[in-house]
Amino acid sequence: MANEWEGKSKGTLLGYKIYIFILKTFGVNGAYFLLHFIVLYYFLFSWNGSKAIYQYFRKRLGYSWPKSIISIYKNYYKLGQTLSDRVTVSTGFRDVFKYTHDGIEKIDDLLKRKQGGILISGHVGNFEISHYFLENRYSINKISMVTTEAEQKNIQEYLAQMSMDTALELILVKDDMSHIFEIHAALDKGGLVVITGDRFLPGTKYLTENFMGAPAKFPLGPFRLASRLQVPVLFVYVMKGKNRNYQLYARQAEAKSRDAQALLKEYTESMEWVLEKYPIQWFNYFDFWEDYS
């Protein structure tokens, strides 16, 4: 059973290289068509992930069991689309998508201060292309994304190589805590640092907060760090709409300085708000609430 997140996500560097070949050969529609076969495989054989996401639909959203089963397939397919779109955007095909914004003025105001900022997101929607929204709109010295996943860092760097004009840089969380200095350096340059707040590794410190009707564990690090730095904090999500549309949502955090728990509470409330609009786009395939039977 998928009791805990193991520190890595599905997908390998070789897989992305193969997918880019298919994308360039057959286009976006061809890539989407291929997804049906990949999704069917995961739907039939990825028992741990399917069980976890089934319980999300059944217990957290209160779906009937038939609707929950159907929603598993929809969820896998939506995940496949977001991964495909991530590759598409990263390799120079941004114009095939439409981008709209809700709360973009929050980022406008943040950048006017020229003091940097923390953007906290999660594994919902397609947060990994958020920097393209910002690059299209602003001239930013640096956008840094913090990741705990070494394999994902290799994938991100490969995708960055395929794109000639991205400002994205990856900061890998390290045991010696040197990533903290990299975050400070990025902020000192007036850049933006993107952090996800919904996964922690076993053995690391965490906070507990009520989320979608039940207690859940969240990593302490992002919320303690963001609450102590003297920079604005925004919750930012990039959600996939119909066809080739994406919507960016940005909300300002109001928690007092050094109050990590209050910041987490605001974060969970913002996640609940987004998932109410996009319930299919929850992409955490493990026992998030630790209450599955």
Image: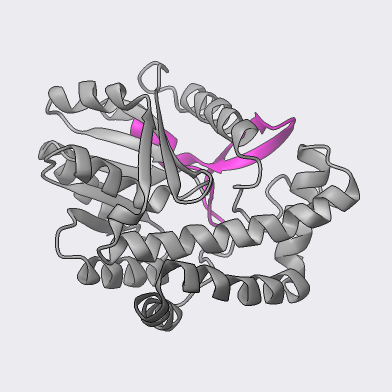
Image side of residue 44 versus residue 131, left or right:
right
Give residue 96's position: percent from left, percent from top: 34, 55
Can the viewer see residue 2?
A: no
Q: Position of residue 113 (x, y in %)?
A: 14, 22
Query: Which of these two is toward me, 13 or 139?
Result: 139
Residue 130, given in percent of the width and then of the height, sits at: 34, 46
Q: Which residues are magenta?
A: 197-226
The verdict on residue 42 being magenta is no
Q: Please check the rendered image and state whether residue 205 is part of the magenta-colored stretch, yes or no.
A: yes
| In the image: residue 22, left or right of residue 162 | right
Query: What's the image's color scheme?
Result: one colour
Residue 230 higher or lower than 178, as above or below: above
Residue 255 lies in quadrant: top left
Residue at point 61% right, 36% down? Answer: 275
- Classify residue 51 as left or right of residue 181: right
Question: Where in the figure is residue 106, as x and y percent of width and height?
Answer: 30, 22
Which residue is pictured at 51% across the width and 26% down the height?
261
Residue 102's place in the image compared with 82, above or below, is above
In this rendering, the count of numbered labels is 0
Judge whether residue 155 can be spotted in this image. Answer: yes
Q: Relative to 247, does residue 69 appear above or below in the rendering?
A: below
* Occupied quadrant, residue 116: top left
| Quadrant of the drawing holding the N terminus | bottom right
Most foreground residue, 160 or 186: 160
Residue depicted at 28% across the width and 47% down the height? 131
